[in-house]
Image: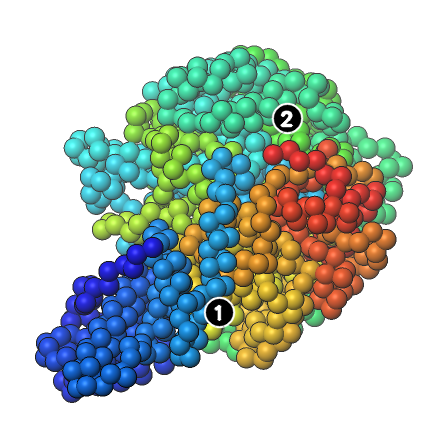
């Protein structure tokens, strides 16, 4: 290999006007060097590099060769700056220039010595030369340099030099071994491996119980707090207007999609023709639940048809077909049971548009929609079950009576519940038994209320509590008075009032609809005078028209007379039941206290949405004739009005709006950007909305896999991502704690690492969305020293592999769903997207790989929920991580084989497996459904892993770890029945397994977090390098839960019993 040519001088890319926080001194290059050294010692590498550049320029201006030594030092120092900044190309350039200058200087010295007659003089390179040759080797190693010849030449030079000043020979030899590992790693270009960033769930989270959303619909065009960051179509450039893209993750019932669509339609109509021509808007609707997406797709298709059939609202309300389609939407989305005529219409629509149509035919009829073949087949599976529930649901769907009796959508009081049971036809003996249970429940509720009174005296007050207290005591009320007020208020409330749902506006529903819903838990179709659907009027003939009833007594009697016909002829709404949901399969009817009759108007017909509608519902604010307001409103009419507007928007925006239905993990969208671009789909978005996803996964997965999908900031659009922690509201005392729970960072620190910042005035965990936007990284460097960066990496790893003990049956829980795959994806994104130096991250990984026990300042979270405020300490602690190193080495090797490390180069390659990875499946036996129901925990709990250990070792079952009791009663009470917003804090469990792993490491077992699990077939699947598999194939394989830290009981099986599938 020939030596590369070293340039005499570096072609500086940093100008003399480089930014520095000190005025450039005129005292010469030496002063610039000293100034740069001062900055370097403070880790201000940008400023230091600028000073060294000024010194280099100063020397070049004088052209004095006597300054060559100082020149070399400045080049060396600047090379070191660039290296620490992660700019390895510039670091290599300066290292080359420094080495070349030193070679030239030594040559001149030798020539002068010979001229002076010193025949003994020799050519000796100074230590600075070898230091820069080693720096060059490191820069080439971590950079994207494909010239292997140059790095091998540099390593040869370092290894062969015998001078005593050369301290880098052994380092060069180790680096050559690492290079050989990388060169021999075969990149798998088949894309078979898909990372598992989220732990598997024992009860499959892909099939979640879901009926109705939780929040008011909001348009993503509007920023909730900062008007300047709202998107106004009229202000956009042609390029911005023609490429708008919004992503809805965990789309649910698509209420925010529809609000955004109506807003965009409203703004579009006010645009001049030239801008309308440019306008293009793409929606991506993503969810892991095929049931939800199938329901959303059905609703959009039916809305589209209503818009095509009716030119205005009046036609939609008066003609049979559009009105009937609206009624189908009402029962599909809000009802637990529906009239048989509605169900038959539903079956007809599903067959017409879906099951008796091919995907190509469907897309031709609805060209604004986009579905992959995989998504299409996944949705058809659910739709096929809806039209044939007898043959598709096992166990069968409950009867109408059983389904409706399991609901409590009325005022929620105990006496009201007894009245409903009587109306449902329960016997006297059963009623007597139920009364006894209700009396016990009342007493328990009283005790819980007393517990809550005590808790308020010491707990962190939520913003809701503080606001309520200040509203009565004044803005300057001291905390002690606010606590006294809240205690007094709660103590004076009756048990029945505590159970009441919050008051809601009822102007959009009729009194007869409310009474019918209260007595039957079902939605009543419109009366004959406002119902143009003849077949539906005939079925409802036994019910006296609500409009002709003169008083409540007559109305109640009419409903009682009709109830037997309802229970006999109506059909359970199959769309609300996922045929694959585990609780349904265990014959477990989920209780539901939602009042859909009242919730839908309050959540869908907010003022902002109504302002975007044609002929919106009348209200006292918009119409002084209150009788007209009352007679024009009913739930059925308003549902038809709303979805006609959705259909109208789809019709008017034909060719302007596209809608992608994407079934599966939202992480896949970021992983398949290249394929999406080939298919004409966006790979970046101006708005991303995540509903409930952070509840299940935490924000680390959002930062690492979803936030990179945000588009770049433009002149008129600030791209943003909004997320919430809705299900676990109140679990954390502050937003820092919530962010820390999975990222090991406070949200201000997350800005420095992930270049995202909260744009809201105040970040909150109390039941609302928080908006994040890209941060302009104007601060010096990363905002974190390399020491703090490595501490964060270690802390993140510890909190991923060793999440704190949690009760698996708790209703409120801090999810710790992250895996080692997400850890590596996060580090890869930090290097590739956010400029964190690869060598710093690699160094941290090397320490985790090479040392069974590490002594670091990183803090391991042992409490749930974790508190960020207590993490800022400098105490060094010792952690035994040997039980987890096999997985880390395995996943790093797999990532390398799939070219997914994003510039990271591990130096401790001797710790890594060297054979290619395969996918294995292992069939487990002996997991009882009863155990699953009693100890499986919440369906959304994602805490599954497996452990490899020597057979006949100690068992760590659930009795030694988490409790198998019910949820923390106080937490559940405060969230669901007290009218408050919740409370931070959670019961902590003690786990022998977790303690044993920390104390004894891999002598207990080797723990893995990355796997998939199928409860129905009881098959675990995972990727493992073949040499690692062969090493441990005699070890026993056992499933573990990392919330309560216990083994799941099943028949003994060995790793070697697994079958290689890929």
Q: Residue at the spot x=37%, y=19% of the render?
A: 308
User: Is 265 above or below relative to 325?
Assistant: below
Q: Quadrant of residue 256?
A: top left
Relative depth, front residue between 1029 and 468 = 1029
Q: Quadrant of the N terminus?
A: bottom left
Q: Quadrant of residue 311?
A: top left
Relative depth, front residue between 812 and 564 = 812
x, y percent for residue 253: 51, 36
Q: How many marks?
A: 2
User: Is 1040 above or below relative to 101?
Assistant: above
Find disc 1 in the rendering and name its residue.
Answer: 170
Q: Residue at the spot x=28%, y=49% of the render?
A: 717
Task: Find numbered disc 1 in the image and state the secondary structure of the residue it sits on.
Answer: helix
Q: Residue at the spot x=77%, y=60% of the render?
A: 1004
Relative depth, front residue between 682 and 843 = 843
x, y percent for residue 889: 59, 55
Position of 693 with respect to 157 (left or right) is: right
Position of 170 with respect to 545 (left or right) is: left
Tell which circle, 2 or 1, labels the residue nearer the N-terminal end: 1
Q: Residue at the spot x=75%, y=36% of the render?
A: 923
| Residue furthest out toward the left | 62
User: Is 373 above or below relative to 825?
Assistant: above
Relative depth, front residue between 407 and 791 = 791
Badge 1 crowding class, 10 Å Cα cut-off, few under 14, some 14 to 19, many 20 or more, is few
């Amino acid at each position: 290999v020939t030596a590369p040519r070293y340039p005499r001088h570096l072609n500086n890319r940093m100008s003399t006007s480089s930014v520095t926080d000190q005025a450039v001194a005129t005292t010469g290059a030496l002063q610039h060097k000293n100034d740069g050294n001062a900055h370097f010692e403070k880790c201000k590498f940008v400023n230091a590099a600028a000073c060294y550049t000024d010194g280099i320029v100063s020397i070049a201006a004088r052209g004095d060769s006597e300054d060559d030594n100082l020149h070399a030092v400045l080049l060396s120092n600047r090379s070191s700056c660039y290296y620490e900044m992660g700019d390895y190309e510039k670091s290599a350039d300066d290292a080359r220039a420094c080495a070349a200058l030193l070679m030239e200087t030594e040559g001149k010295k030798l020539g002068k010595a010979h001229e002076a007659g010193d025949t003994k003089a020799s050519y000796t390179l100074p230590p600075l030369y070898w230091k820069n040759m080693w720096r060059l080797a490191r820069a080439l190693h971590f950079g994207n340099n494909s010239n292997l010849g140059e790095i091998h030449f540099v390593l040869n030079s370092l290894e062969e030099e015998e001078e005593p000043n050369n301290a880098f020979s052994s380092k060069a030899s180790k680096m050559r071994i690492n290079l050989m590992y990388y060169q021999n790693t075969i990149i798998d270009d088949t894309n078979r491996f898909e990372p598992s960033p989220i732990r598997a769930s024992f009860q499959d989270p892909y099939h979640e119980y879901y009926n109705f959303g939780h929040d008011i619909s909001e348009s993503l065009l509007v920023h909730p707090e900062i008007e300047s960051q709202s998107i106004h179509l009229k202000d956009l450039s042609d390029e911005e207007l023609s490429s708008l893209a919004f992503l809805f993750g965990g789309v649910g019932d698509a209420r925010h999609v529809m609000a955004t669509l109506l807003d965009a339609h409203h703004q579009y109509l006010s645009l001049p023709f030239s801008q309308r021509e440019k306008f293009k808007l793409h929606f991506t609707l993503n969810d892991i639940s095929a049931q939800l997406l199938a329901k959303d797709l059905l609703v959009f298709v039916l809305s589209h048809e209503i818009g095509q059939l009716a030119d205005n609202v009046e036609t939609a309300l008066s003609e049979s077909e559009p009105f009937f389609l609206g009624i189908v939407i009402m029962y599909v989305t809000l009802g637990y049971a529906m009239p048989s005529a509605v169900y038959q219409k539903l079956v007809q629509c599903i067959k017409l548009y879906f099951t008796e149509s091919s995907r190509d035919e469907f897309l031709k009829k609805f060209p604004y929609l986009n579905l992959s073949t995989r998504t299409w087949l996944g949705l058809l599976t659910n739709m096929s079950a809806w039209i044939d529930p007898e043959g598709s649901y096992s166990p069968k769907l409950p009867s109408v009576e059983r389904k409706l009796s399991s609901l409590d959508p009325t005022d929620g009081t105990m006496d009201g519940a007894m009245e409903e049971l009587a109306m449902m036809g329960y016997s006297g003996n059963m009623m007597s038994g139920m009364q006894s249970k209700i009396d016990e429940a009342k007493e328990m509720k009283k005790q819980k209320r007393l517990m809550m009174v005590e808790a308020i005296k010491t707990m962190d007050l939520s913003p809701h509590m503080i606001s309520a207290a200040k509203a009565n005591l004044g803005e300057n009320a001291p905390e002690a008075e606010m606590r006294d007020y809240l205690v007094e208020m709660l103590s004076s409330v009756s048990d029945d009032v505590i159970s009441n749902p919050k008051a809601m506006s009822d102007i959009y529903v009729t009194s007869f609809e409310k009474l019918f819903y209260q007595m039957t838990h079902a939605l009543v179709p419109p009366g004959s005078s406002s119902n143009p659907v003849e077949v539906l009027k005939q079925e409802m003939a036994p019910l006296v028209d609500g409009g002709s009833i003169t008083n409540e007594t007559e109305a109640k009697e009419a409903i009682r007379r009709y109830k037997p016909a309802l229970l006999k002829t109506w059909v359970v709404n199959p769309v609300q039941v996922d045929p694959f949901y585990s609780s349904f399969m265990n014959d477990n009817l989920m209780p539901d206290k939602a009042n859909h009759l009242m919730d839908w108007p309050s959540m869908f017909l907010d003022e902002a949405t109504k302002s975007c509608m044609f002929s919106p519902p009348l209200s006292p604010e918009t119409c002084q004739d209150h009788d007209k307001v009352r007679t024009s409103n009913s739930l059925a009419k308003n549902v038809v009005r709303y979805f006609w507007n959705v259909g109208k928007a789809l019709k008017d925006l034909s060719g302007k709006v596209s809608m992608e239905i994407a079934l599966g993990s939202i992480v896949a969208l970021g992983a398949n950007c290249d394929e999406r671009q080939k298919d004409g789909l966006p790979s970046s978005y101006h708005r991303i909305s995540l509903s409930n996803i952070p509840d299940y996964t935490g924000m680390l997965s959002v930062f690492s896999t979803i936030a990179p999908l945000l588009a770049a900031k433009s002149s008129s659009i600030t791209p943003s991502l909004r997320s919430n922690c809705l299900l676990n509201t109140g679990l954390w005392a502050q937003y820092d704690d919530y962010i820390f729970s999975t990222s090991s960072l406070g949200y201000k620190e997350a800005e420095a690492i992930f270049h995202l910042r909260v744009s809201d005035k105040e970040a909150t965990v109390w039941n609302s969305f928080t908006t994040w936007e890209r941060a302009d990284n104007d601060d010096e460097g990363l905002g974190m020293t390399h020491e703090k960066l490595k501490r964060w990496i270690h802390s993140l790893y510890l909190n991923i592999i060793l999440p704190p003990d949690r009760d698996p049956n708790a209703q409120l829980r801090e999810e710790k769903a992250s895996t080692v795959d997400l850890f590596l994806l996060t580090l890869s994104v930090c290097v590739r997207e956010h400029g964190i130096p690869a060598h710093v991250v690699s160094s941290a990984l090397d320490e985790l790989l090479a040392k069974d026990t590490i002594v670091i300042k990183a803090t391991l979270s042992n409490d749930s929920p974790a508190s960020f405020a207590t993490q800022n300490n400098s105490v060094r602690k010792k952690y035994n991580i040997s039980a987890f190193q096999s997985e880390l080495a395995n996943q790093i090797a797999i990532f390398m084989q799939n070219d997914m490390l994003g510039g990271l180069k591990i130096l401790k390659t001797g710790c890594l497996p060297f054979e290619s990875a395969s996918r294995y499946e292992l069939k487990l036996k002996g997991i009882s459904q009863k155990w699953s129901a009693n100890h499986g925990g919440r369906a959304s709990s994602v805490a599954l892993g497996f452990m490899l250990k020597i057979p006949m070792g100690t068992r760590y079952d659930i009795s030694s770890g988490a409790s198998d009791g019910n949820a923390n009663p106080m937490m559940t009470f405060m969230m669901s029945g007290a009218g408050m917003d919740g409370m931070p804090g959670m019961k902590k469990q003690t786990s022998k397994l977790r303690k044993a792993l920390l104390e004894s490491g891999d002598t207990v077992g080797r723990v893995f977090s990355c796997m998939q699990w199928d409860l129905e077939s009881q098959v675990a699947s995972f990727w493992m390098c073949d040499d690692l598999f062969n090493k441990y194939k005699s070890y026993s394989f056992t499933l573990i839960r990392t919330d309560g830290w216990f083994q799941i009981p099943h028949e003994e099986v060995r790793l070697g019993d697994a079958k290689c599938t890929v």
